[in-house]
Image (cartoon, helix red, strand yellow):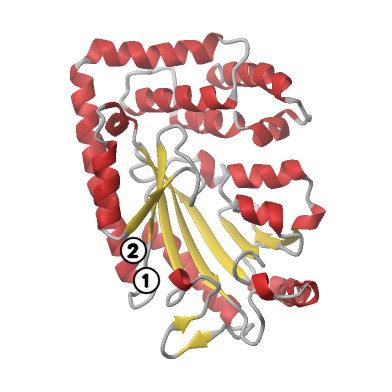
Amino acid sequence: MLNWYLQSGKDSDIVTSTRIRIARNIKGNKFPKNASKEEREKILNIIQEITPKIGYGLKFLKLKDMDDLTKLALIEKHLISPEFAVNHEDGAILINNDENICIMINEEDHLRIQVFSAGLELESSLNLAIEIEKTIGSLVNFAYSDKYGYLTECPTNVGTGLRASVMVHLPALTATRNINKVLDVTNNFGMNIRGLYGEGSNTQGNIYQISNKQSLGISEKEIINSINLITNKIIEQERTARKYLAKKSIELEDRLYRAYGVLTNCRKISSEEAKKLISDVRLGTDLGIIKEMTDLKVNKLDLYTKPANLQIYLEQELDEKQRDIERAEVIKKIINEE
């Protein structure tokens, strides 16, 4: 069985993935940022003790027991935040073998319950996240206010504690220079639209993250409905832009096959250049122009060309120059897989 980030799902020609994140804190304990080392250790001990009762095949792993490469690989898969990996020695995760469930412990809140899916799967992902949240809530008491709802470190998460997000691949809107209009409309709908790794990050490979801004005074269902509404509008706009580009078929085919040609024949390639070229190859594959590729191959290229996951794939640590050489070889190997 493939991990979720190698799979394709509903509308995955544009929506690469869905994430549901629910923030919770344990009643009577300080938020991690204001807690002492001993107080954060207490939270770790509480969660470690109840892990077998939570189920879902979750394993308890402390960040301080992981090497830097493992943590970076988790960041590249979007399973943990960059800030969490760097600044939280008293942090841990609960993660299952499929890696579609990853709970961050002692990040900004005591618990950040995350469920991931390929494609646009907001409802089913939310249902699983709520199921996990209820299971944990039966084992510990969450901090809750009758007036405000669930209490969190950041005021923007107070209420439901829910942050729903989707990753969208928008190369055609970028190429037709309509991307800024889409960004403006998304912001006006009360949504955040950010780069690949969330707040403060840049866009890479024409991939954007859309998420809700509000969690107070609004239900989980309303949040999901709003994200679905704006995402479907963006899907519609991107597909329209792709049809427009396809009218100039020889120019589009030339551009996409040039990207495929470089990936197929390069002898060394940086992570940044690979991202740009893979974006074009993904578009060519989704449009049925590049028939030599499959969704699975594109997803493998996307994952295994990233620095940490490349090294884990090869089972060896490499400096930047070596990575650029080996990345080219891995790309050719994946493209030529039967």
Q: What amino acid does circle 2 point to?
A: Ile
Contact check, label 1 and label 2, Cβ < 8 Å = yes
State the image quarter where residue 221 is shown. Answer: bottom left
- The quadrant of the rendering that contains the N terminus is top right
337 versus 5 height, above or below: above
Residue drawn at x 31%, y 14% is: 253
Residue drawn at x 80%, y 76% is: 38
Binning the other alpha carbons within 10 Å of mark 2 as few (below 14), some (14 to 19) or many (20 upward) gives many
Residue drawn at x 26%, y 53% is: 230
308 versus 56 height, above or below: above
Question: Disc 1 designates what residue?
Answer: 220
Image coords of residue 231 (percent x, y): 29, 50
- The quadrant of the rendering that contains the C terminus is top right
Question: Disc 2 designates what residue?
Answer: 224
Q: Is residue 158 left or right of residue 239?
A: right
Q: What amino acid does circle 1 point to?
A: Glu
Binning the other alpha carbons within 10 Å of mark 1 as few (below 14), some (14 to 19) or many (20 upward) gives some
Image coords of residue 298 (percent x, y): 48, 28
Along the line of sight, the residue nearer the viewer: 24 or 201: 201
State the image quarter where residue 164 is shown. Answer: bottom left
265 versus 302 height, above or below: above
Q: Is residue 98 visible?
A: no
Q: SS for tag 1? A: helix
Image coords of residue 250 (percent x, y): 25, 10
Marking on residue 183: none
